[in-house]
Amino acid sequence: MRGFDHVTTRRLHESALGALFLLVLAGGSSRAQSQDRIEKQWLECKVDTSRSEGKLRFLTGPVDNYYFKVGESIARALRAQGNAGHTHNALGVEDIPTPQTTCNLLGLQAGQADLALVQSDVAHDAWYGHPPTSTTPWPGISLVAPLFVEDMHVLVRPHLNVARLADLRGRRVWLGPKGSFTALSAWRILDAAGLTKEEIEALENRCPMPAYMADTGEDCDLVIKEMDRETALNALERLELDAMFQVGAPPFDPVRDKLVPPLPGKPRPNTPVDPNTPVDKDPCPAIRKARQEDPTLKDREIHLFSLDIDLVDRLARDGSYIERLIPADTYCQETATRTVGVRALLLTNRVATDPVVSRFADKLFQSQAIIEKELKAAVKAEQKLHGDPVTGDPSKLGLLQAETPDSLFVRYHKQIKDEGRYFRPWVEFAKKDVPLLICIALILVLVLYRWRRVIGELIVKRGELALGLIGLLLVWVITSVLLHYCEGNVNEEFSTFHAAMLSTLEDFVPWADGPLTPKGQQYWAIFRWIPPAIVGGMLLPSIRKSLWPRVVRKGKAWLLGLGQARTTGTGTSAGSDHWVIINRPSSEELIRNMQTNGGAHGKPVVVLSERPVEFHGRPEYAGVQLVHGDPTSEECLRRAGIFQARSITIHSAWPPPDPNDRRKYLWGDLADARTIQALRAVSKCRGPGRKVEIVAELRSQKNRSAAQEAAPGAQIRIICEENWTRREVTRRQLE
């Protein structure tokens, strides 16, 4: 039994080793076949790198391509440093053009180059061994630096208005030059939009034909996938294609020549012009106006298609693509275009211990301004030659100081990671936005210093307002920065920090457009409630001090008035020839006597008082009407029927204006001042031609002349409390 176990175990081990050996052979064979295929494809590129002995071989791209301009500027800037006397730290770099950017990756894989510019989605497939770029992973290729972003341009023919990218199913679409990285990116985007492999192949395996015409089934001389870029653009203009894809750094010159029509008297696209001929820097306003006036421009208009935000989010998750927004003025469109971009990555196949990569990265970071200057000069020369607006864009290597996603961060060359050469996303913010914030802060400091007395007194009296305003400003700036970071690449309203600050204010309106990205919506859901809370905290002390006591008084007056027969707070129905009493007297003898002499059975009595008045439910008070309000205001006097009044009595029983004042009535000159103010208001309301008897009660005899002057021409009887009793006031009123 033991022998049987030993023999069986030995045979199992032999079988396992045999299977493992076969797998190793298969893997090696697959790797060898992959390497043979790569070398064969590299030979088809017909690129000679043998003359760059002793230098870093840097593959760029076609000579009419932006990749070539970037690579040439980098190599030229690094060579210039060596020529300037820094030979001890100079690096020999030879920029080598290639017929297609697909040859750049092949050169690295075949070991025929040291550096190359490669799209991020293609590099992603090479690292993970995803077809059709590669059948096996290539971990030996590492990242030196991300440089710039190329945007995917989806151009749609005139009169075609599709809602989603999936609506291109069954149409005629050019995906890019055959075998190019543009075609690969278009495949991946259409696949993410929901199209199958067969449906994508059918888009370009058709003959170009005029729109709205069915396929005849006949063979054509040139199918869509065999077209070059210029042929495809012309076919799109003639409505023989429905759409086309093009990857390029905006403004991409061939695309701009089709999207931006020439104005009368201006050179045609791709027509060389005299370098001394002036060129408009911003022709978009004139072009938009011409489109409104010239129907031929409107009818032949090709436009950019904006991708769905969900599609953009899905494509950007693994780091292969980046969220992008093409501004409207880039191609003189009506609105900005939401799309995805591919990062242009500078890759190397140098081993992890090679210090040359570290030196190259150092010089690249230090020479960014020089490289951008060289690149801008080359771009301007081409724009001037073509008669395009001479802006020098694109010429920025912004990704050198942009945050690198985690999926790319792990791909950095070991020398770069070990020596801490990480990119600093805060540098760009410090260069652009911090100076603006400093200017705003200085302006605020100057304002505070200039009006320090007024502002200081306000802070002492109303500290909650000052703290609240500072809090609102901080929340506004922080929210704008976060939304600009989350939305800047896909939402035109947040594309710049200035636009983000304005859009943040506008988004507080309920019907305004909010953020688009999930992260932006998450931040907005939190920060949108902070300003209302701060404003509520600013107003709460004022509400408690002023508004709340007034509401309490109004409520109390309403409750007290429920038990009275006739009470009005908005006006009186007394008619004419009635008595008006301003302020409730300290005793109710006057009202009882007035009612006895004609109140309930004659003319009614109207009491105008600042505070709620309560009369007991006795018969003599049944004809009394109440008006609540300020007796010195014209509006309250009108509601009391002052125009039709027979007599007006002003009592000196004025309540204190401060609700926290424990005194029941004002005394002395304070009370007389309110009486004189009421006399002026009555005189103004009545007018010079209206005669009425006014009985006014004063606290002090010395204010008599001022009271008489307050109502010139009126019949005024002044009663001083120093000399008369309440019964005298009653008698004077009834005379």
Image (spheres, grey):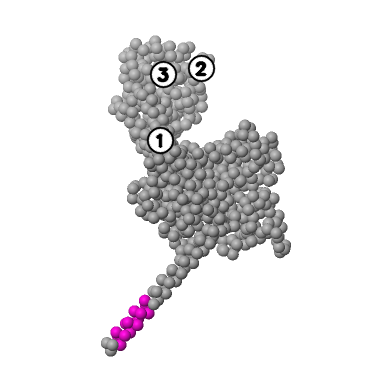
Tell me which residue sits at (56%, 38%) in the image: 380
- Check residue 677 in the rendering and tell me which mark sits there, or answer none: 3
Pinpoint residue 175: horizontal percent, then vertical percent. Answer: 59, 56
Closer to the camera in the image, 711 or 168? 168
Number of numbered discs on residues:
3
Which residue is the site of mark 2? 687
Identified by mark 2, the residue type is Gly
Q: Looking at the image, is 31 positioned above or below residue 651?
A: below
Q: Looking at the image, is 638 positioned above or below residue 302?
A: above
Pinpoint residue 550: horizontal percent, then vertical percent. Answer: 38, 33
Per the image, is 250 magenta?
no
Is residue 180 visible in this depiction of the protein? yes
Q: Earlier in the sequence, mark 3 or mark 1?
A: 1
Q: Looking at the image, is 103 positioned above or below residue 8?
A: above
Tell me which residue sits at (67%, 37%) in the image: 267
Identified by mark 3, the residue type is Gln
Closer to the camera in the image, 462 or 91? 91
- Check residue 666 in the rendering and tell me which mark sits there, or answer none: none
Which residue is the site of mark 1? 434
Q: Looking at the image, is 335 positioned above or below residue 203?
A: above
Tell me which residue sits at (48%, 12%) in the image: 713
Q: Residues within 10 Å of mark 2 (few under 14, many from 20)?
A: few
Pinpoint residue 581: horizontal percent, then vertical percent. Answer: 42, 23
Question: Label 3, label 1: how many angstroms apart (C-alpha)?
Answer: 57 Å
Stretch in magenta:
4-17
Q: Nearer the viewer, mark 2 or mark 3?
A: 3
Pinpoint residue 22: horizontal percent, then vertical percent. Answer: 42, 74
Identified by mark 1, the residue type is Val
Is residue 322 visible in this depiction of the protein? no
Disc 1 secondary structure class: helix
